[in-house]
């Protein structure tokens, strides 16, 4: 169960609503938002960046401790080259324009995913942002770039196999499960309490497959560029009404200790 006992008393959320400690968010619907307005898809992505700014700020205001955003999947490279180029350009603009403000607001920024396919200047901007904000203790913002859940599990399994091969023994299944998280890209983060996906789609699209085993899912019909604090509050309100049993009491006890 979420450790964060902050309560919301403003907006469209009941005063006794519990804020999830960690929210994961699949930001979907930029293209459909643009198409509905007769605009190029790139306009939808630009509007999506503004939504990202709003939600990061709103999450901090509402007392969320961890926010993980699915910004670019490993499958997104299959999109048209011009669209991918624009997405990478917007990413660089975001890092250049937002890093100082994130630092001023005590936000720590981290990036997960395979960075090797990113351009060198993009990797440098990521490194600079992570170094600058490393000591911040406010909202812990994680951006998933060139990320795929299956890839993460494969890399984690490879790392664990190598580790045990060097140690010269085969672990039992309980040890494998308890140690597996330490090989994930999110090893320093708690598992998400709540996963939100926008645009009406009802799937998690290869995002945080291990970590979301006991997350609550909220699927919003709002397209990402229109998503705002009110929509975030509504998702938190829905989450707060859920009965989170984690399968059974034994499993809940084990997850709480992890």
Image (spheres, rainbow, N blue to C red):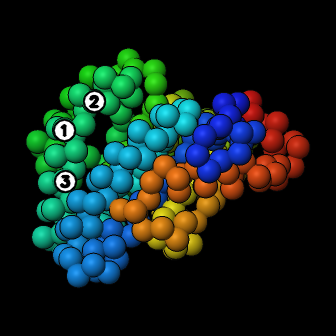
Give neighbour class at mark 3: few <14, some 14-19, many 20+ (Cα, 10 Å). some
In the depicted structure, whether residue 46 falls above or below residue 189: below
Give neighbour class at mark 2: few <14, some 14-19, many 20+ (Cα, 10 Å). few
- Kindly identify which residue carries mark 1: 97
From the viewer's side, name the closer residue of 207 and 175: 207
Residue at the outermost top position: 135
The reply to whether residue 166 is in sight is no
Q: Which mark is residue 45?
A: none
Residue occupying image coordinates x 55% and y 66% = 220
Q: Determine the CA span between mark 1 and mark 3.
A: 10 Å
In the depicted structure, whether residue 135 falls above or below residue 85: above
The reply to whether residue 95 is in sight is yes
Identify the secondary structure beneath mark 1.
helix
Q: Which mark is residue 101?
A: 2
Q: Check if mark 2's residue and mark 1's residue have beta carbons within 8 Å.
A: yes
Left-right relation of 99 to 51: left
Going from the N terminus, do you reach mark 1 or mark 3 first? 3
Residue occupying image coordinates x 46% and y 25% = 138
From the viewer's side, name the closer residue of 58 and 175: 58
In the depicted structure, whether residue 243 falls above or below residue 78: above
Identify the secondary structure beneath mark 3.
helix
Toward which corner of the image does residue 78 lie, by quadrant?
Answer: bottom left
User: Where does residue 104 sit, x and y in percent of width and height?
Assistant: 31, 23
Q: Check if mark 3's residue and mark 2's residue have beta carbons within 8 Å.
A: no
Going from the N terminus, do you reach mark 3 or mark 2 first? 3
Instruction: Indicate the quadrant containing the C terminus: top left, top right, bottom left or bottom right.
Output: top right
- Kindly identify which residue carries mark 3: 90
């Amino acid at each position: 169960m979420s450790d964060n006992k902050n309560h919301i008393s403003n907006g469209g959320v009941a005063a006794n609503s519990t804020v999830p400690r960690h929210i994961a968010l699949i930001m979907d619907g930029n293209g459909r938002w643009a198409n509905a307005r007769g605009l190029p898809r790139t306009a939808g992505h630009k509007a999506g960046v503004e939504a990202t700014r709003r939600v990061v700020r709103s999450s901090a205001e509402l007392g969320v401790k961890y926010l993980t955003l699915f910004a670019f999947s490993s499958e997104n490279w299959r999109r048209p080259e011009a669209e991918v180029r624009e997405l990478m350009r917007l990413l660089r603009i975001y890092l250049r324009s937002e890093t100082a403000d994130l630092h001023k607001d005590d936000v720590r920024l981290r990036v997960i995913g395979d960075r090797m396919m990113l351009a060198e200047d993009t990797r440098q901007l990521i490194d600079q942002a992570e170094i600058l904000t490393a000591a911040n203790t406010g909202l812990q913002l994680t951006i998933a770039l060139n990320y795929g859940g299956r890839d993460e599990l494969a890399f984690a399994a490879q790392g664990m196999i190598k580790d045990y091969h060097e140690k010269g023994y085969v672990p039992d299944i309980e040890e494998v499960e308890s140690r597996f998280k330490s090989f994930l890209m999110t090893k320093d983060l708690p598992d998400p309490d709540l996963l939100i996906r926008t645009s009406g789609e009802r799937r998690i699209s290869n995002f945080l497959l291990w970590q979301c085993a006991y997350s609550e899912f909220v699927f919003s019909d709002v397209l990402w560029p229109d998503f705002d604090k009110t929509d975030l509050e509504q998702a938190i309100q829905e989450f707060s009404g859920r009965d989170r049993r984690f399968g059974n009491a034994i499993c809940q006890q084990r997850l709480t200790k992890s």
